[in-house]
Amino acid sequence: MTEKKYVPKSETVTYAVAALGQGLIYSCMSSYITDFYMNVLALAPMFVTMLMLLARVWDAVNDPMMGMIVDRHTTKWGRLKPYPVITALPIALFTILMFTKNLFGFDLSQKIPGKTPDSMVSPVGVLVVVAVVYVLWGMIYTAGDVPFWSLPNLMTPNQKERAKIVSYGRTWGGVGSAFTVALPIILGFTALAKRSDFNDIKYFIMAVVMTVIGIPLFIMSSFKSKERIAVPNAARKDPNEPSTLSRIFKCKPLMMVVLAGILSFGRYMLQAAAPHVARYAGFYIGIDPMTATMEQLNKNMSTVQTVIQICTAVGMFGAMLILPALYEKFEYRTLMIGSCLGGFGAGVLAFIIGIATHNLFICMPFFLIMAIPLGVINVVSGIMVFDCLDYMEWQTGYRDNGLGSACQSFVNKLGNAFATVAIILMYEIIHLDVNSLNASGNAVLAAAQSLQPAQHNAMFALVTLVPGLSLLLTAVPLFFYDFIGEKKRTVNEQLGEKRKERGIEISD
């Protein structure tokens, strides 16, 4: 493959900034939707579980559909570039609606008597509104996400240059996620923490702020990126042509990356479970929970959450920053496997030391190490997917840019769903009833005074053992990923000629 450079630095930076904006939006949902549903709206754990799983089943159809659309149609503005602009405002609207407690004046946390004495349940209307908003958000987000992350495929034919664009994009997308993580924590140290409805409003404020900042950044990719690889529109499908999905499933390297991505769902726990751990894991810094005020407990929650998520951010971004220097020395597979095994060991040690000492600060180095594979997986798995598309193009003569990225989009959302389900299952296993704790008012105080040590330890496992075991499983399919070394070099050398034969034009 040619080593010619196609993409100017300014274009790479603009794409990275657009990814930052997208990270602001996505992290709103991935980091806090479970806490909002269960501890603000006090929805039944089983309903939240089923919503997440059924929404992901729909994504199994929705994501590939979007991939097929972008692969088969080119507009006068480009094949991929129009979609971030088209979806920007709907994404912003539904992100805010998703964290609005009194949606259209309808209190989504309202309750009616249940079937058992003293039990309360959400009206059917509440559940329908929540489900519709969540599913529509996912569909609209997919319509912008799949084309956006497919763009590097058309920006350059140079694999190293493409890897650089993806690295910068994923890294700055992670920075956007960190901003989203930081805002609710910062709010916990402000005067707002004194309000009795603090937990009800902090996520709404976050959603508004992040969409106002994130959406203008996200749409920059549509105006500043150039699609240099002009892929002809697919002709009317030949009945003898293998289906797009069959090509995907027959590409062994891609299937190994997808399977590893699914098994890596635990990496989302360090962010998604942090609010739950801060609320219920029993770590108290400088206060006595039995005599503390609500303001003190809210600030303690913010402190515990800050410790976990700062360690996560430092470890993740540190890994992302040094990755470009490691690409020349190590195979992508080696980086993935090594970081996952290290993360597993750190997770086990953090759990053992945490429950033995109940000192969160001693666990900080292990949180840092456990966060390294978050950065590696976020960046390297995306690069590996694009490499797999090269292999599939060489193997079949077809390049399914959108569908390949749709696979990764689906895996990411499935991973978030599994992380959410793991949190909810832990609530069920330890018999932690958020309704009985009353999600508003003195919820944190009640939890601090009523939970047992075994329940505290189980909640702590959500950010230690669960992600650690997930990372161990992630490494397994990667041992069977064989698109490396001489095989990869041979395929890349032959691919250029095959593209010329197919009429694929590349502009400067």
Image: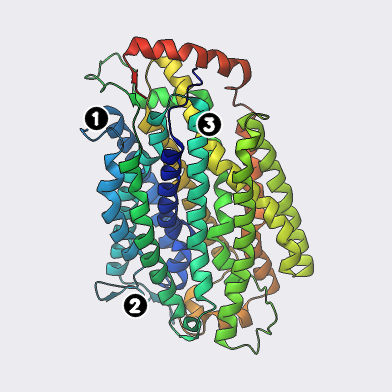
User: How many other residues sit within 10 Å of disc 3, few (<14), some (14-19) or many (≥20)?
Assistant: many
The residue closer to the viewer here, 126 or 430, is 126
- Using the image, determine if residue 221 lies above or below residue 150: below
Say if residue 204 shows up in the picture.
yes
Mark 3 or 2, nearer chain start: 2
Q: Residue 341, percent across and down?
A: 70, 42
- Using the image, determine if residue 392 lies above or below residue 360: above
Q: What's the amino acid at mark 3?
A: Met
Mark 1 or 3, nearer chain start: 1
The residue closer to the viewer here, 492 or 346, is 492
- Using the image, determine if residue 89 lies above or below residue 450: above
Q: Residue 214, percent across and down?
A: 38, 56
Badge 2 is on which residue? 110
410 left or right of 304?
left
Badge 3 is on which residue? 384
The residue closer to the viewer here, 48 or 208, is 208
Q: Residue 148, percent across and down?
A: 37, 41
Q: Are marks 1 and 3 in contact (CB under 8 Å)?
A: no
Mark 2 against mark 1, which lies toward the viewer? 1
Badge 1 is on which residue? 73
Q: What's the amino acid at mark 1?
A: His
User: How many other residues sit within 10 Å of disc 1, few (<14), some (14-19) or many (≥20)?
Assistant: few
Q: What's the amino acid at mark 2?
A: Gln
Q: Residue 80, percent across and down?
A: 31, 36
Distance from the alpha carbon under mark 3 to that under mark 2: 46 Å
Mark 3 against mark 2, which lies toward the viewer? 3
- The residue positioned 34% from the left and 57% from the top of the image is 134
484 left or right of 402?
right
User: How many other residues sit within 10 Å of disc 2, few (<14), some (14-19) or many (≥20)?
Assistant: some
Mark 2 or 1, nearer chain start: 1
Distance from the alpha carbon under mark 1 to that under mark 3: 25 Å
In terms of image quadrants, where is residue 248?
A: top left
